[in-house]
């Protein structure tokens, strides 16, 4: 499984050209209303020895590679089985995009997801290999394939929802910034982008910013103008006012500094 956001357009084209006319690749997100998610998101690729040899020469392919999946399932069927995990739903019906395949999330789902959904996600998979920070490539055991896969949704309890939701915000905001402000990431490796965005959101947490638009504004200015942006005597009170719910941060900035924001 690869995430295309980590690859340059040229590398993406070279990667898919190794399949020639075999069409052994499937996106996990196929939403015409959000084409950037399909363009930047995860794909399942069916591999063989010749493709593996070609991939070794691709720039930053290891950065894009999130999993090796050993499975008895046909690739198209496997992609259809995994796709529902791209959306996580709380018990109250809240829904959010989820990069379920990143190491810390797939570990948590394997360990703590309700049995019904864990079985739906890992059915027919012998081993799910992922890159562990401590141990390198590490295998999660799959679940025996006992019946024809049925449609399913990933629903989790409140504790797991809170644990997973921070990652969905990072993915969503990273994709949005890559689409609308790519200059923010000039010279930054694609696999480092989510880490930078996650750090800005942690800073927003420390300032008490909870409104989604405020967190987006904070992240954009921090990435575009640097950490000193929010340290001035003029800016810090605006953060406090936004955190207290007086007005959206962008509105406060515009009132203070004009349309430059």
Image: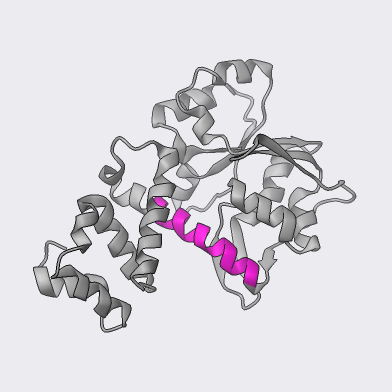
Q: From the viewer's perspective, is residue 209 above or below residue 5?
A: below
In this rendered view, identify the residue nearer to me: 85 or 255. Answer: 255
Residue at 50% x, 17% y is 57
Can residue 151 be seen in the rendering of this structure? no
Magenta stretch mostly in which secondary structure?
A: helix
Q: In this figure, what is the number of numbered marks?
A: 0
Q: Quadrant of the C terminus?
A: bottom left
Q: Quadrant of the N terminus?
A: top right
Residue at 34% x, 48% y is 179
Where in the figure is residue 244, as x and y percent of width and height? 31, 82
Residue at 30% x, 51% y is 180
Where in the figure is residue 85, as x and y percent of width and height? 64, 55
Residue at 23% x, 51% y is 224
Q: From the viewer's perspective, is residue 230 above or below residue 24?
A: below
Where in the figure is residue 48, as x and y percent of width and height? 69, 21
Question: Per the image, is 254 magenta?
Answer: no
Bounds of the magenta span? 159-175
Where in the figure is residue 16, as x and y percent of width and height? 53, 27
**36 left or right, relative to 128:** left
Colour scheme of this structure image? one colour
Furthest residue in direction right, as rendered: 146
Can residue 173 be seen in the rendering of this structure? yes
**29 left or right, relative to 73:** left
């Amino acid at each position: 499984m690869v995430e295309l956001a980590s690859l340059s357009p040229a590398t993406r084209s070279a990667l898919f050209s190794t399949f020639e006319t075999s069409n052994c690749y499937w996106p996990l997100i196929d939403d015409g209303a959000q084409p950037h998610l399909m363009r930047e998101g995860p794909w399942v690729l069916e591999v063989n020895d010749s493709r593996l040899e070609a991939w070794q020469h691709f720039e930053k392919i290891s950065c894009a590679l999130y999993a090796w999946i050993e499975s008895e399932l046909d690739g198209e069927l496997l992609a259809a089985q995994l796709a529902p995990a791209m959306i996580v739903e709380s018990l109250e019906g809240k829904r959010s995009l989820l990069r379920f395949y990143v190491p810390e999330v797939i570990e948590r789902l394997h360990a703590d997801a309700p049995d019904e959904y864990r079985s739906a996600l890992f059915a027919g998979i012998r081993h799910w290999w992922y890159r562990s920070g401590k141990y390198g490539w590490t295998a999660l055991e799959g679940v025996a394939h006992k019946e024809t896969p049925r449609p399913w949704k990933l629903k989790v309890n409140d504790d797991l929802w809170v644990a997973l939701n921070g990652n969905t915000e990072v993915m969503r905001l990273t994709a949005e910034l890559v689409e609308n402000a790519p200059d923010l990431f000039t010279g930054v490796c694609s696999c480092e982008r989510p880490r930078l965005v996650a750090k800005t959101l942690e800073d927003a947490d420390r300032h008490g910013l909870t409104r989604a638009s405020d967190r987006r504004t904070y992240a954009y200015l921090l990435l575009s103008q640097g950490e000193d942006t929010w340290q001035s005597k003029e800016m810090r009170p605006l953060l406090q006012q936004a955190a207290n719910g007086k007005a959206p941060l962008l509105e406060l900035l515009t009132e203070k500094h004009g349309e430059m924001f």
